[in-house]
Structures are given as C-alpha cells and as structure tokens.
Image (cartoon, helix red, strand yellow):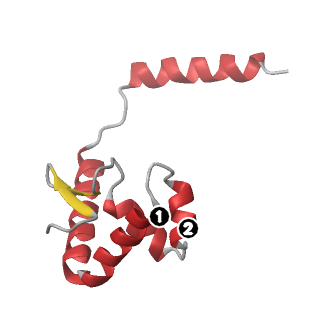
C-alpha cells in the first residue's frame, strides 16, 4: 500500500513524512471534520498532506477498512490482556487521591 501521501512503517500506516497515523485522519474525516479542520488539529501536516491522506482513504476503501478493522482488533486484544493494578497499588493511589482532594480549598 504505497502512496505519495501515505507510507507504511512497522506495520502501521502514517501520513508520509509524519508521525500522524492514517487512522487519525480517517476518524476525523468520518466524524465530519473538513480537511482544513483536520489540518488545524494536526498542525505538523500541510493541507496537501491531509487531502492526500483523505484521497488515499477514498480511493482505497477496502484496504483502509481492513486496516481500521485490524487496529480495532489489536486494541481489543490489548484491553483483554490488560490487568488492573494490584491491590497495594490501588490502595496507594486511593490514599494519594484523598490527600490531593483534601488539600484543595
């Protein structure tokens, strides 16, 4: 999946020459954000890069959807494997939280 405005690095898709994921751009676009608004949210990108990422998404719908599905699956797996902090840590955090709120005026 090579494109002028999208590149694959370590199994993930990014806006070429940036640290912004293609998924970030797609989700903003799907939520109704204009390319200009997306560019404001990611000021390291040029407007041309945003339009290029959107064009990639629109011209590669099956590949883009498969990529997003894979990201979702990976996220769900991470959540599934995640563990709650042990009881001692939870107790310590609870004490710290109570002290913090007790000190507020």
Q: In percent of the image, x 35 and y 70: which residue is there?
A: 52
Residue 46 pos. (x, y %): 45, 58
Residue 21 pos. (x, y %): 33, 56
Q: How many marks?
A: 2
Q: Which mark is residue 47?
A: 1
Q: Nearer the viewer, residue 103 or 22?
A: 22
Q: Nearer the viewer, residue 8 or 84?
A: 8
Q: CA distance from mark 2 to mark 1?
A: 7 Å
Q: Earlier in the sequence, mark 2 or mark 1?
A: 2
Quadrant housing the C terminus: top right
Rendering quarter of residue 12: bottom left
Q: Which mark is residue 67?
A: none
52 relative position to 93: left or right? left
Residue 17 pos. (x, y %): 29, 50
Residue 24 pos. (x, y %): 40, 60
48 relative position to 66: left or right? right
Q: In percent of the image, x 32 and y 62: which residue is there?
A: 22
Q: Nearer the viewer, residue 88 or 14?
A: 14
Q: Which mark is residue 36?
A: 2
Quadrant housing the N terminus: bottom left
Asked whether disc 2 touches disc 1, contact meaning CB atoms under 8 Å apart, the reply is yes
Q: In percent of the image, x 76 and y 16: which residue is there?
A: 103
Rendering quarter of residue 87: top left
At mark 1, the secondary structure is helix
Q: In percent of the image, x 33 and y 49: which residue is there?
A: 18
Q: Note whether 40 is above or below 69 in the view shown.
A: above
Q: Residues within 10 Å of mark 2 (few under 14, many from 20)?
A: some
Q: Residues within 10 Å of mark 1 (few under 14, many from 20)?
A: some
Q: Note whether 84 is above or below 33 in the view shown.
A: above
Q: Nearer the viewer, residue 73 or 21?
A: 21
């Amino acid at each position: 999946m090579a494109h002028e405005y999208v590149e694959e690095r370590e199994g993930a898709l990014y806006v070429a020459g940036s640290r912004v994921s293609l998924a970030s751009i797609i989700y903003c676009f799907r939520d109704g954000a204009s390319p200009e608004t997306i560019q404001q949210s990611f000021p390291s990108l040029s407007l041309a890069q945003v339009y290029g990422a959107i064009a990639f998404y629109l011209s590669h719908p099956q590949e883009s959807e498969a990529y997003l599905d894979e990201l979702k699956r990976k996220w769900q797996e991470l959540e599934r494997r995640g563990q709650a902090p042990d009881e001692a840590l939870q107790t310590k955090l609870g004490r710290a939280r109570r002290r913090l709120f007790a000190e507020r005026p």
